[in-house]
Image (cartoon, helix red, strand yellow):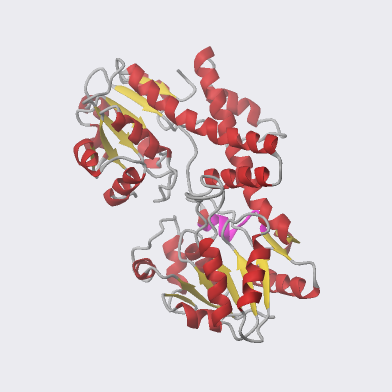
Amino acid sequence: MKVSNVCCLGAGYVGGPTMAMIAAKSPGIQVTVCDFNQARIDAWNSDTLPVYEPGLKEVVESARGKNLHFTTEIKPAIAAADLIFVCVGTPTKSYGIGAGRAADLRYIESAARLIAEVSDSDKIIVEKSTIPVKTASAIQTILSANNTSEATFQVLSNPEFLAEGTAVSDMENPDRILIGGEQTPEGQAALESLVEVYANWVPRDRIITTNLWSSELSKLVANAFLAQRISSINSISALCEATGADVDEVSRAIGYDSRIGPKFLKASVGFGGSCFQKDILNLVYLCESFGLPEAADYWRSVVTMNDWQKSRFVEKIVRTLFNTVSGKRIAILGFAFKKDTNDTRESAAINVCRDLIAENAQVIIYDPRVPRETIHRDLLEVGVSQEVIEQNVKVVADPYQAVEGAHALATLTEWDEFRALDLPRIYDLMLKPAFVFDGRAILPAEALSKYGFKAFVIGKG
């Protein structure tokens, strides 16, 4: 099948940017992105996109209204499509069997039922959401059981490997595109159809094809390995603080080893984002389900270390500020889980702020891309009451406003603008002694010391 019409179910962080790139690079293919959320679709059709990524607006505007469309009219888009990407959410279950570990596949199941209900022609269904291994089999079962026409369905796995903040460059020049399909003539034909879509701009030698189960599992494993490196270096950061070593120097030394490499060896207050913790917990659940408790315990320890790093950061702040932050103003610079994104899912800043508020601190938060409403929502979701938020949380529009009268400053996102802060001005605005807790190693320790700050940088004391 030559693909001429693509439908994407889900207009979130994966669906919107990925489909925009496919449309921009494949002018002969009509791409329709669907979502039940009218406000989200309206945002994609506006000048203020719901997802912030450097360069994304330009990509969207190059194709929108030509061969890229955003709509809530889902059934007609499914019916017209040759190929359907499923980019719906797969959150961690919060109830029942596997709560806190297993993926909640209710939206995947709903999407499969809707596709079966609407389709009257052959379709290729592409799993783009991060899902547990063997999900394709469940999708195929649902499609077959609910099919009311002569349509046939082929299910492919095509996990995304986008890093938020660099998603556009990741899509334009990917390390690899991974596609898994059934080892049947029909499955391989469907797989080749998707290969042809990506081949519009991705070199063939970077398009890897596998069986379905290898592709589904590879996404979880990739994120688990990356998160494991972060937890590993964070564990070493604590040892560096105890021994007088410098974690940046240790990272650089081991990163020169070609067997290790330098990536994901930057000590920090902890990893966040929509994928790492969710995918590791899913991997834990899979290991347990297949009777592999030792493997499950190993991967669970990656999350445990990440949680400990966040709590250790808060404990350092409290201990340094004379064992109490009650009534003290703590300036927080950065709330997104990383720079160049407005995504706050699982951001370390959420837990840090929650724990400081639990100590009765006043937190003053500045982030260049995260709005007040999102910050309040995230704090409510981790148990901070609306009353406490109104009393103890203030969101400001300027970093200097955040530090004015503050007892301490904590940097939690590595936004580039923080590296250019006027440190003497910040020092003058803060109460003395002026404490800085640099959870992302944004500000050079030497400069902090030079300007009179009492500085505490992850892995350096």
Residue 187: x and y, percent? 75, 71
Can residue 191 be seen here? The reply is: yes
Q: Which residues are drawn in magenta?
A: 168-177
Seen in the picture, residue 431 relative to 190 is either above or below; the reply is above
Query: Nearest the camera: 107 or 397?
Result: 107
Residue 133: x and y, percent? 67, 55
The quadrant of the image that shows the N terminus is bottom right
Task: Report if residue 173 lies within the magenta region.
Answer: yes
Can residue 412 be seen here? The reply is: no
Please count the marks in the image: 0
- Residue 389 lies in what quarter of the image? top left
- Residue 255 lies in what quarter of the image? top right
Q: Residue at x 29, y 27 (%)?
A: 359
Seen in the picture, residue 149 relative to 286 is either above or below; the reply is below
399 lies left or right of 210: left
Residue 102: x and y, percent? 57, 49
The quadrant of the image that shows the C terminus is top left
Task: Report if residue 453 lies within the magenta region.
Answer: no
Residue 249: x and y, percent? 56, 23
Q: Residue furthest top?
A: 243
251 lies left or right of 353: right
Q: Residue at x 61, y 84 (%)?
A: 148
Q: Residue at x 48, y 28 (%)?
A: 308
- Residue 349 lies in what quarter of the image? top left
Q: Residue furthest front?
A: 96
Query: Nearest the camera: 235 or 387?
Result: 387
